[in-house]
Image (spheres, grey):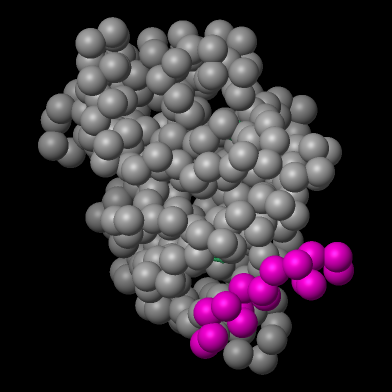
C-alpha cells in the first residue's frame, strides 16, 4: 500500500513485538447507534446505524464478567452504549462482581426520550462517567458534534453534579478533550493534559458552576470518520508522518492495548476499540481470530500473545501518548 514507503512500519519502530500483559480491562462496544454523528467519530456512529449488541452476545458477556475475577474494569462504549438494551444488565453484572464500570457517555443522551433516568442510575451504581467535551467553547463543540450539543452537555454536567458526580468520592466524572481536526498541514498534538485540565476546571466552574475530576486528552487517530476527513483533505499521509515524528518510546509500556480486550457487538475480540473499527481482530498464538465463545470455552482470557498493530498506532505513541484514559506519560 502507498503508505509503507513513507513511514516506518509501527512494529519495526518498536523493535520488539508488542506483547500482551494480563488482561484486567474488558471494553465492550455495544454498537454503532448514537443520537449524535460527530465529525471526529472513529466509530462512524449515528442515529441511522443499526448494528448493536444482540441478546445472545450480551448473555455471553455477562457470563464472562462473572467467570473472570481478574477483570477489574468493565468499560462500556459505543455509539451511545446507554441506547442498547444490554447496557443495564452488563452494568449490574459488573457491579455484582465488584468491578469498576466505566460508561463513555456523550451527555446529550439524557435528554432523549426514554433516557432521562441515566444520571440517577449512574450514581446508584457508582458508574464512572467519562464524557466527551472536546472543547469548553460552545462554537467548537457544536462544529464537531452538532448544533446545541454544547448547551445540552453543560446542562447534563450540572445534572451529574446535582446527583453527586465530581464531588462525592465514589462518583467520578472525567471529561475527554479531542483536538479539532486539522484544516491544513499545521498539525498539533493535544495541549499538556494537566495544564488543560486546570483551564477546563476554572472555565467550567466560573461560568457554569461545574465540577469534574480528571480531563483526558485524546489524540485523533486516523481511523473512522477522522480518516475519511483526512483523506478528503489529502492530509492522511502527512498526518501519519507527523504522528510518527512525535513517537515517544516511553509510552509503549503503558499502551491501553497491553492489558485490555475490546469486544464488538458480534462477540469478536480485538486488542482495542481502534482495531475493532479497522477490522483488525486479536489473534491467538496460532494466528486465529478470537471470539467471546472461545474465551469462555478455554476458561482463559489470556489467549493473545501479541497485539495487532497498524500505522494509526502512532497516534497512541505520539508526544505524551494517548489512550481511553488520556495521556500515558508526562512529557
Ligand atoms: S463521537 Fe461519541 S457521541 Fe459522537 S457520534 Fe461517535 S459515539 Fe456518538
Ligand atoms: S491503536 Fe493504540 S491501543 Fe490500539 S493497538 Fe494500536 S497502539 Fe494499541
Q: Quadrant of residue 159?
A: top left
Whole-percent x and y of residue 218? 47, 45
Q: Quadrant of residue 50?
A: top right
Q: As drawn, is 215 to the left or to the right of 49?
A: left
Whole-percent x and y of residue 64? 46, 65
Locate the N terminus by quadrant.
bottom right
Q: Residue at x 48, y 12 (%)?
A: 138
Where's ligand 2: which quadrant? bottom right
Q: Quadrant of residue 85?
A: top right
Q: As drawn, is 217 to the left or to the right of 231?
A: left
Look at the picture and state if 74 lies above or below 103.
below
Q: Residue furthest bottom?
A: 286
Look at the picture and state if 60 lies above or below 224.
below
Q: Residue at x 60, y 22 (%)?
A: 145
Q: Residue at x 75, y 45 (%)?
A: 235
Numbered circles on residues, count: 0
Q: As drawn, is 225 to the left or to the right of 90?
A: right
Q: Residue furthest right?
A: 1
Foreground residue among 41 and 91:
41
Whole-percent x and y of residue 318? 49, 58
Q: Which residues are magenta?
A: 1-16
Residue 31 in view, yes or no = no
Q: Is residue 274 magenta?
A: no
Foreground residue among 254 and 68:
254
Q: Is residue 8 magenta?
A: yes
Locate the C terminus by quadrant.
bottom left
Whole-percent x and y of residue 194? 26, 41
Q: Residue at x 53, y 74 (%)?
A: 296
Amino acid at each position: 500500500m502507498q503508505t509503507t514507503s513513507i513511514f516506518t512500519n509501527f512494529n519495526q519502530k518498536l523493535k520488539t513485538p508488542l506483547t500482551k500483559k494480563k488482561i484486567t480491562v474488558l471494553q465492550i462496544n455495544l454498537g454503532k447507534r448514537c443520537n449524535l454523528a460527530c465529525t471526529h467519530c472513529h466509530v462512524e456512529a449515528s442515529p441511522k446505524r443499526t448494528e448493536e449488541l444482540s441478546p445472545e452476545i450480551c448473555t455471553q458477556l455477562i457470563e464472562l464478567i462473572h467467570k473472570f475475577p481478574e477483570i477489574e474494569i468493565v468499560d462500556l462504549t459505543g455509539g451511545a452504549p446507554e441506547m442498547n438494551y444490554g447496557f443495564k444488565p452488563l452494568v449490574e453484572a459488573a457491579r455484582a462482581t465488584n468491578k469498576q464500570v466505566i460508561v463513555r457517555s456523550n451527555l446529550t443522551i439524557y435528554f432523549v426520550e426514554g433516557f432521562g433516568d441515566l444520571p440517577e442510575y449512574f450514581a446508584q451504581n457508582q458508574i464512572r462517567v467519562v464524557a466527551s467535551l472536546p472543547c469548553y467553547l460552545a462554537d467548537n463543540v457544536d462544529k464537531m458534534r452538532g448544533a446545541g450539543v454544547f448547551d445540552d452537555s453543560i446542562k447534563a454536567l450540572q445534572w451529574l453534579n446535582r446527583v453527586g458526580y465530581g464531588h462525592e468520592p465514589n462518583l467520578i466524572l472525567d471529561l475527554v478533550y479531542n483536538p479539532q481536526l486539522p484544516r491544513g498541514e499545521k498539525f498539533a498534538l493535544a495541549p499538556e493534559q494537566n495544564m488543560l485540565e486546570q483551564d477546563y476546571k476554572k472555565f467550567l466552574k466560573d461560568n457554569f458552576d461545574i465540577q469534574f475530576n480528571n480531563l483526558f486528552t485524546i489524540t485523533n487517530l486516523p481511523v473512522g470518520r477522522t480518516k475519511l476527513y483526512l483523506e478528503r483533505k489529502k492530509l492522511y499521509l502527512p498526518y501519519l508522518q507527523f504522528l510518527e515524528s512525535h513517537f515517544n518510546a516511553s509510552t509503549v509500556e503503558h499502551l491501553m492495548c497491553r492489558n485490555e480486550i475490546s469486544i464488538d457487538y458480534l462477540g469478536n475480540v480485538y486488542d482495542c476499540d481502534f482495531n475493532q473499527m479497522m477490522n483488525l481482530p486479536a489473534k491467538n498464538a496460532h494466528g486465529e481470530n478470537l471470539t467471546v465463545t472461545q474465551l469462555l470455552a478455554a476458561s482463559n482470557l489470556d489467549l493473545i500473545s501479541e497485539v495487532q498493530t497498524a500505522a494509526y498506532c502512532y497516534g497512541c505513541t505520539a508526544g505524551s501518548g494517548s489512550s481511553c484514559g488520556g495521556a500515558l506519560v508526562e512529557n
